[in-house]
Amino acid sequence: MSARLLVDGRLTRSGSSIDVSLDLDLSNPIGVSGPTGAGKTTLLRMIAGLEPDFGGRVEVTLDGQQEIWSEPGRGNLVPVHRRHIGFVFQDSRLFPGRTVQANLDYAIQRARAVGPVQDVDSMIRALKIESLLNQPAELLSGGERQRVAIARTLLSKPKLLLMDEPMAANDNVHREALIAYLSDWLEKHKIPMIYVSHSFAELRRIVPQCLVMARGRVVAQGGAAEVSIL
């Protein structure tokens, strides 16, 4: 079933701006790369409805249903919590004061409202977080927090997955395991994904297509292998 995303508009603040006009086929995962400050994270936030000053249009087709999430002059028509987006932030955004298990349980409860729950135990083992379940989230290392955030997001059964440098804090061993698991998970569940990373080597292994941003604009678009050598 086709999945598309249209983002068209401009966000200006503090002397900088993001100006995009995108019509993306999300039938396959898409990556976003570019230097620090290019607007990658802001683009994801605009899609998610987390940038209230964005005055443009966001339109999606997911599960065969077309929705307008925001529209010029009318702002956000669909609130963040009703967009069914799974967002993995750079800083993980785990719930403080709760254990890893409690963070995962939150996602599991959300998923039960829409259908069968995934194999939680196999995901926990694959992401190498089984020894962390009883630990408070605030005591985890950066890489551990990212792995728990990935598990929580995937377990929530999103209709659209947005991932912002989700592996940056992990060492090479954990990163390899994450790449392998995420690739398999996407192949199995067919969830549309937009994946931000500075690493073209990482992107080439996860996404077939890629955008390159610079100074708030998309400056290249195409196959991940091709745009990485521009």
Image: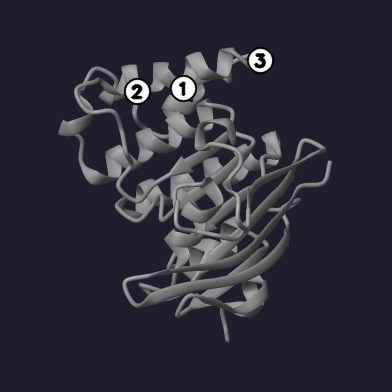
Mark 3 falls on what kind of element? loop
Amino acid bearing label 3:
Gly
Q: Residue at x 77, y 35 (%)?
A: 63
| Residue 177 picture quarter | top left
Give residue 107's mark: 1
Asked whether the beta carbons under mark 2 and mark 3 sit within 8 Å of each other, the answer is no
Compared with residue 162, is residue 155 higher up or lower down, i.e. above or below?
Answer: above
Q: CA distance from mark 1 to mark 2?
A: 7 Å
Q: Which disc number belongs to residue 191?
A: none
| Side (left or right) of 26 relative to 128 | right
x and y, in percent, of residue 11 in the image:
48, 66
Q: Is residue 171 left or right of residue 208?
A: left
Q: Secondary structure at mark 1?
A: helix
Residue drawn 45% across and 47% down? Answer: 50
Query: Which class describes the residues within 10 Å of circle 1: few (<14), some (14-19), or many (20+)?
Result: some
Q: Farthest front residue?
A: 73
**Disc 2 and disc 3: Cα gap in Å?**
19 Å
Q: Which one is in front, 160 or 127?
A: 160
Q: Are marks 1 and 2 in contact (CB under 8 Å)?
A: yes
Residue hosting label 3 = 115
